[in-house]
Image: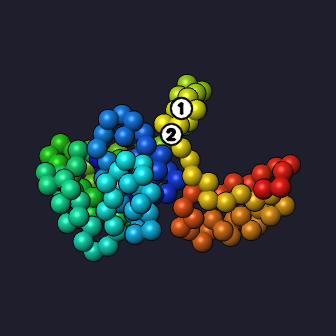
């Protein structure tokens, strides 16, 4: 399975859940995210002009599934990386349907959240926290998150010192 933006918050969760389900995961991300992907059990590839070659080197027959979190150009090149019968899904770009893929929009229900909480309690699913901010510094938290490449979630705390 190929996961785009595999070192980010959503991508990291996707990598962990896919690994938990027994999938081999190829995680695409910037150079700075490669070690994080390895730590999650994925096989990292670096975004750049040779991304397709890197993926094909790891999965010569193509990937059985690809999960897109970014859309746009990242999504456009993904169908060529699929194995025959491979599936493509995006949560970022409805144009995935024009490429034969599925546009996924879900709302977690109580059972899904309970399952995720259980996996977190078992330390099977982890969430990296890049930085915490007290509520009165929410604007700083927003600026920090907007800069991108945080390496984890930005948390705003209420009633604490952050």
For image coordinates 34% across by 68% down, the residue present is 47
Question: In the displayed structure, does residue 141 sit left or right of residue 33?
Answer: right
Residue at image x 18%, y 60%?
Answer: 57
Residue 105, position in %: x, y? 48, 43
Q: Is residue 50 above or below residue 112?
A: below
* Residue corresponding to mark 2: 125
* Left or right of 16 on screen, residue 114: right
**Is residue 98 shown to the viewer in this render?**
no
As displayed, is residue 22 above or below residue 75?
above
Residue at left offset 37%, top offset 47%: 41
Mark 1 crowd level (few <14, some 14–19, many ≥20, 10 Å Cα): few
Position in image of residue 110 (x %, y %):
60, 27
Q: Nearer the viewer, residue 78 or 58?
A: 58
Going by the picture, which residue comes out furthest to the top? 111
**Image x and y of residue 23, in percent:** 30, 39
The tag on residue 108 is none
Camera-side mark, 2 or 1:
1
Position of the C terminus, as image quadrant, is bottom right
**Residue position marked by numbered label 1 in the rendering:** 122
| Closest to the observer, 80 or 41 | 41
């Amino acid at each position: 399975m190929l996961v785009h933006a595999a070192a980010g918050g959503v991508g990291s969760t996707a990598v962990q859940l896919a690994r938990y389900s027994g999938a081999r995961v190829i995680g695409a991300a910037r150079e700075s995210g490669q070690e994080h992907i390895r730590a999650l059990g994925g096989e990292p590839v670096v975004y750049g002009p040779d991304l397709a070659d890197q993926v094909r080197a790891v999965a010569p027959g193509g990937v059985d599934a690809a999960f897109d979190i970014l859309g746009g150009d990242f999504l456009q090149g993904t169908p060529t990386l699929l194995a025959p019968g491979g599936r493509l899904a995006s949560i970022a770009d409805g144009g995935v349907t024009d490429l034969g893929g599925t546009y996924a929009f879900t709302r977690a229900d109580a059972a899904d959240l309970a399952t995720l909480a259980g996996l977190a309690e078992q330390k099977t699913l982890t969430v990296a926290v890049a930085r915490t901010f007290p509520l009165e510094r929410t604007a700083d938290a927003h600026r920090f998150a907007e800069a991108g490449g945080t390496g984890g979630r930005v948390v705003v705390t209420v009633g604490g010192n952050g």
